[in-house]
Image (spheres, rainbow, N blue to C red):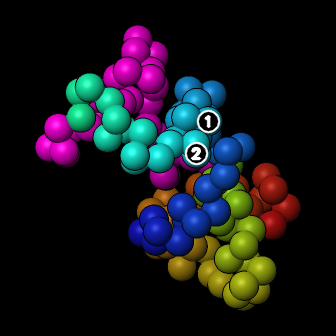
Amino acid sequence: MRTDEILKHLSREHLSDSLGLFIDVFSELDMEDIKKKNYYKNDGFDIIRYIIESFDGINFKVPSVKNMRNLIEKYLEERKLEVPGISVVRLAHETGLSEKTIKEYLKANKI
């Protein structure tokens, strides 16, 4: 699976609202801000402490790339533009999805 290539297409529209909050908070984060926190220890847990502090009580799920249909569809669209004759078999291999699922996505989006 080409997870790194698929993730290059990730944008806010592909995320749940709760994960979108991460974008809001982390886009303005400077590690110097964390170093100023009373809990800072430089022990590898500082970012976890910051997440707990910033998102206390919020539940969120980190999705599997394969389960992010709109992201996969964006990837398929881009791959078909890059390599017009790319096969369904190849796309299935690149995404880790079945050929049937790839065909369904391509058909649904007229790709």
Q: Position of residue 100 (x, y in %)?
A: 58, 59
Residue 99 position (above or below residue 37): below
Taking the image as shown, residue 78 lies to the left or right of residue 95, namely right
User: Which residue is drawn at the image coordinates 32% and 40% (left, top)?
Assistant: 35
Query: Which picture quadrant has residue 40?
Result: top left
Q: Position of residue 7 (x, y in %)?
A: 54, 61
- Quadrant where the image shows the N terminus: bottom left
User: Which residue is drawn at the image coordinates 45% and 65% (left, top)?
Assistant: 3
Give the secondary structure at mark 1: helix
User: Which residue is drawn at the image coordinates 54% and 79% (left, top)?
Assistant: 90
Residue 59 position (above or below residue 88): above
Question: Residue placed farthest to the front in the image?
Answer: 36
| Alpha carbons under labels 1 and 2: distance apart | 6 Å
Q: Position of residue 78 (x, y in %)?
A: 72, 73
Residue under circle 2?
27
Between 75 and 85, the one nearer to me in the picture? 75
Q: Are marks 1 and 2 in contact (CB under 8 Å)?
A: yes
- Quadrant where the image shows the C terminus: bottom right
Query: Which picture quadrant has residue 45?
Result: top left
Taking the image as shown, residue 37 lies to the left or right of residue 98, namely left
The disc at residue 24 is 1
User: Which residue is drawn at the image coordinates 41% and 11% (left, top)?
Assistant: 57
Query: Which picture quadrant has residue 33?
Result: top left
